[in-house]
């Protein structure tokens, strides 16, 4: 816990406590008042004061938060009106816990003695006198050295993580941002992305994409809003702020921003990065935020996770696409492209739609443990600034986004080679499977053919009146026109010994030029032959 900077003043009726806690989680602030004991808690800050006089909680107490300065102004009534509280400037004394500050001898000291001491009694004595008060050190704000790394909205913050790093571990990925040069951050970020890319995960989502196809078919609200605008409906009528969003706007600080022209492009580019992360979470949850939404947005946004400051739109798009293939649950090229298209649509709708997205992100960060500091560093300022941002610059950025085309070979993950190898492997597996099935089919045919030959060899074909049938002109079947020699004990259907008199075939059939000789199962036992003309034969 951090001890915030504070100051006290008084009048005849009230004690006024001014607490500076710029990165506190205001929604969860707690204040405790009992006699001369005052406690303040707003993560990650904790303040406990032992006052020279008593104060009361009777409904007249007030607490206000100034978001511009990050300070709490707490007014508490005195128990005795007109009482003067001495030593309000002695801050160290006010922070000291109740009781003496001198060193004390052990409560129980056992020397050489034959008497037995009950261990439970000793333990009870120690528990009753144990001091659970944590040590508090008055906060002294250190001056930020010249040349220290800058981060936050419009690169206006520095030194924030010097004292908050322990409390906010895991919120950002960059280590020691107040002492590490920004160029090192970028190199470390790209190296970590390279290590986090999982080829097996990517291929699994590529070939088992049923869930992803459902996400691709999802229609986010800005898609319907854009359709209305394209039908000549005004943006203000298509994009509607809810009452809850309007209430959030009323609670935002009133600020004006003087941003250097050299820094201003990075502010717009950082907005693209944050909106991409938000659009990905919105699409993959189909608009239903979950407990992982805050993590997803922070992880996909290099601005929020690495305090990145971009200088061109290509770098932003590349970073967004790379991180969407490295960290979240769904890692699919088509899905990332769909999210990029969502970003284009959001920027087409302009300030109001961007504001709605930022307000939603602000709410998500408040509910996520420790990530509220990112609201103080970025999101709150973006919510205020976007309302007065240049419409022409946003339109220009929207046009530039339409021209951005991120290719797979620019990712640095060898995606094309990976997909090609996977496709060849799949094709080879299919060919092997087809070959195996063909072998099985051929073996079955050979078995059936052998069985049939065995049956034919064991069959006698002594037929005295075997006849040849053919199609006559009137469609009837004639018999006895030609007989086959069946003196042999075999079936007598050997191709070399079979003599077919073409004169018995109808002249119309001769023009077809092909006859198919088939053995009729019905006449097998009699040794007859059925000659059928394939009328569908294609010359």
Image (tube, rainbow, N blue to C red):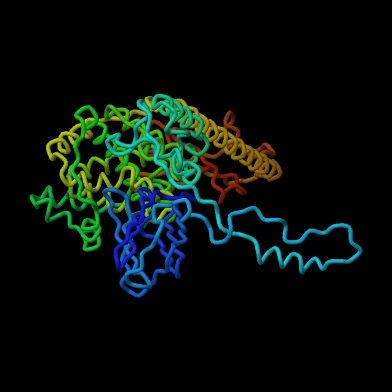
Does 477 sit left or right of 81 as displayed? right
Q: Is residue 167 visible?
A: yes
Q: Is residue 275 above or below residue 221?
A: above
Q: Which residue shows up at 89% across the image and 66% down it?
A: 115
Quadrant of residue 489 within the rendered picture: top right
Quadrant of residue 332 within the rendered picture: top left
Q: Is residue 396 above or below residue 356?
A: above
Q: Nearer the viewer, residue 356 or 285?
A: 356
Q: Which residue shows up at 70% across the image and 63% down it?
A: 126
Residue 111 in picture, x, y percent from top left? 85, 57
Quadrant of residue 157 within the rendered picture: top left
Q: Which residue shows up at 38% across the image and 62% down it?
A: 85
Q: Is residue 345 above or below residue 415?
A: below
Does 26 sit left or right of 465 as displayed? left
Residue 23 in picture, x, y percent from top left? 37, 48
Q: Is residue 352 above or below residue 404?
A: below
Q: Can residue 324 be seen in this view?
A: no
Q: Nearer the viewer, residue 361 or 32?
A: 32
Q: Nearer the viewer, residue 299 or 1?
A: 1
Residue 41 in picture, x, y percent from top left? 43, 58
């Amino acid at each position: 816990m951090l001890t915030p900077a504070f100051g006290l003043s008084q009048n005849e009726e009230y004690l006024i406590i001014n607490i500076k806690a710029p990165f506190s989680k205001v929604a969860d602030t707690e204040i405790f008042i009992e006699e001369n004991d005052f406690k303040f808690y707003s993560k990650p800050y904790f303040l406990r004061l032992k006052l020279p006089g008593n104060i009361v909680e009777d409904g007249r107490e007030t607490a206000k938060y100034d978001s511009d300065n990050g300070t709490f102004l707490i007014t508490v009534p005195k128990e005795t009106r007109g009482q003067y509280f001495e030593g309000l400037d002695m801050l160290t004394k006010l922070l000291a816990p109740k009781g003496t500050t001198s060193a004390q001898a052990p409560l129980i000291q056992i020397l050489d003695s034959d008497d037995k001491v009950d261990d439970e009694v000793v333990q009870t004595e120690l528990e009753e006198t144990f001091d659970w008060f944590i040590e508090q050190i008055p906060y002294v704000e250190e001056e930020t050295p010249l040349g220290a790394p800058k981060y936050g909205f419009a690169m206006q913050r520095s030194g924030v993580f010097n004292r908050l790093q322990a409390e906010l571990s895991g919120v950002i990925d960059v280590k020691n941002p107040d002492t590490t040069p920004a160029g090192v951050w970028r190199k470390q970020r790209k190296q970590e992305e390279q290590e986090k890319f999982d080829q097996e995960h990517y291929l699994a989502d590529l070939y088992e994409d049923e869930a992803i196809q459902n996400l691709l078919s999802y229609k986010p609200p800005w898609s319907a809003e854009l359709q209305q605008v394209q039908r000549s409906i005004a943006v203000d009528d298509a994009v509607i702020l809810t009452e809850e969003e309007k209430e959030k706007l009323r609670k935002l600080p009133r600020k004006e921003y003087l941003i250097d022209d050299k820094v201003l492009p990075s502010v717009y580019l950082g907005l693209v990065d944050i909106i991409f992360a938000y659009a990905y979470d919105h699409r993959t949850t189909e608009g239903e935020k979950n407990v992982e939404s805050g993590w997803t947005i922070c992880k996909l946004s290099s601005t929020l996770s690495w305090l990145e400051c971009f200088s061109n739109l290509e770098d932003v798009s590349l970073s967004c696409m790379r991180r969407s293939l490295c960290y979240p649950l769904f890692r699919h090229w088509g899905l990332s492209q769909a999210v990029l298209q969502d970003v284009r649509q959001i920027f087409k709708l302009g300030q109001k739609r961007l504001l709605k997205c930022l307000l939603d992100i602000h709410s998500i960060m408040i509910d996520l443990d420790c990530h509220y500091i990112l609201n103080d560093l970025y999101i709150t300022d973006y919510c205020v600034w976007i309302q007065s941002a240049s419409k022409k610059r946003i339109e220009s950025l929207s046009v530039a986004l339409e021209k951005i085309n991120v290719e797979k070979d620019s990712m640095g993950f060898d995606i094309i080679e990976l997909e090609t190898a996977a496709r060849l492997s799949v094709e080879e597996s299919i060919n092997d499977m087809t070959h195996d099935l063909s072998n099985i089919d051929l073996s079955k045919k050979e078995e059936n053919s052998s069985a049939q030959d065995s049956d034919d060899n064991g069959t006698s074909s002594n037929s005295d009146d075997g006849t040849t049938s053919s199609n006559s002109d009137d469609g009837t079947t004639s018999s006895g026109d030609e007989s086959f020699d069946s003196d042999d004990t075999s079936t007598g259907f050997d191709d070399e010994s079979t003599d077919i008199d073409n004169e018995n075939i109808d002249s119309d059939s001769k023009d077809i030029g092909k006859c198919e000789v088939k053995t009729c199962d019905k006449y097998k036992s009699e040794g007859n032959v059925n000659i059928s003309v394939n009328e569908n034969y294609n010359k």
